[in-house]
Amino acid sequence: MALTLWQRIRVAFRGWLRRREEEEQRKREEFLAKNVRWSAAGPAAPVPAMPPRPAALHLDLDGLQVAYLDDSGMIEYYLDKTTGDVLDVRDGTKPEGSRLIRVPSRSETTETADRRAFVESLEESPAKAMLAGAAVPAEFRRLIAADRRTERAWYNFRNERATQAIESWLRSLGLR
């Protein structure tokens, strides 16, 4: 499975952070070992090792949102439960391993429900009336594209709904 440039950068950055934390931990332990003998009253007490900080799972929420909203049908997206990364598979092969979960995508009924909810959220206007009458998604997109303010509001609304769906999915998996 090939990694995109962005995924490679992210992996390199995480490795850099991990090495940095290990170096800081080593310096702390070295400092304590040198300076614990300040007391003149007998031998130094053993220094308890600091417990390692549990690594919080950092989920790639932007990648999850892209995966959820992608309706091209050309790419399958998987969430790695151990790293939180989103992997894309373009060649149709199914990756092996229990740590990878297929990211759900938006269904046609969800998209229709989102369009209806968006139209209902608009104030009364000619644009609202036209959008309410849009029967097919292509017509809806054409009407949305005619007004920049409405288009921006639509994409903000759609992204917010996608974020809510992703959060709900993550909670169902126990990752949130």
Image (cartoon, helix red, strand yellow):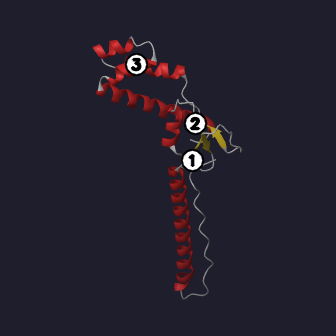
Q: Amino acid at mark 1?
A: Asp
Q: Amino acid at mark 3?
A: Phe
Disc 1 crowd, CA 10 A, few/some/many (<14, 14-19, 20+): many
Disc 3 crowd, CA 10 A, few/some/many (<14, 14-19, 20+): some
Query: Which residue is identified by label 2?
Result: 75
**What residue do we see at 51% from left, 33% from top?**
70
Residue farthest toward the front in the current orientation of the protein: 91
**What residue do we see at 66% from left, 43% from top?**
100
Is tag 2's residue or tag 3's residue first in the polypeptide sequence?
2
Residue 124 visible in image: no
Q: Which type of secondary structure does the marked residue at label 3 adopt?
A: helix
100 is higher (above) or lower (below) than 139: below
Q: How many marks?
A: 3
Image position, residue 168 (x, y; %): 55, 33
Q: Amino acid at mark 2?
A: Ile
Q: Find the distance from the CA under tag 1 to the CA under tag 2.
A: 16 Å
**What residue do we see at 53% from left, 21% from top?**
108
Query: Which residue is identified by label 1?
Result: 85
130 or 37: nearer the viewer = 130
Q: Are marks 3 and 1 in contact (CB under 8 Å)?
A: no
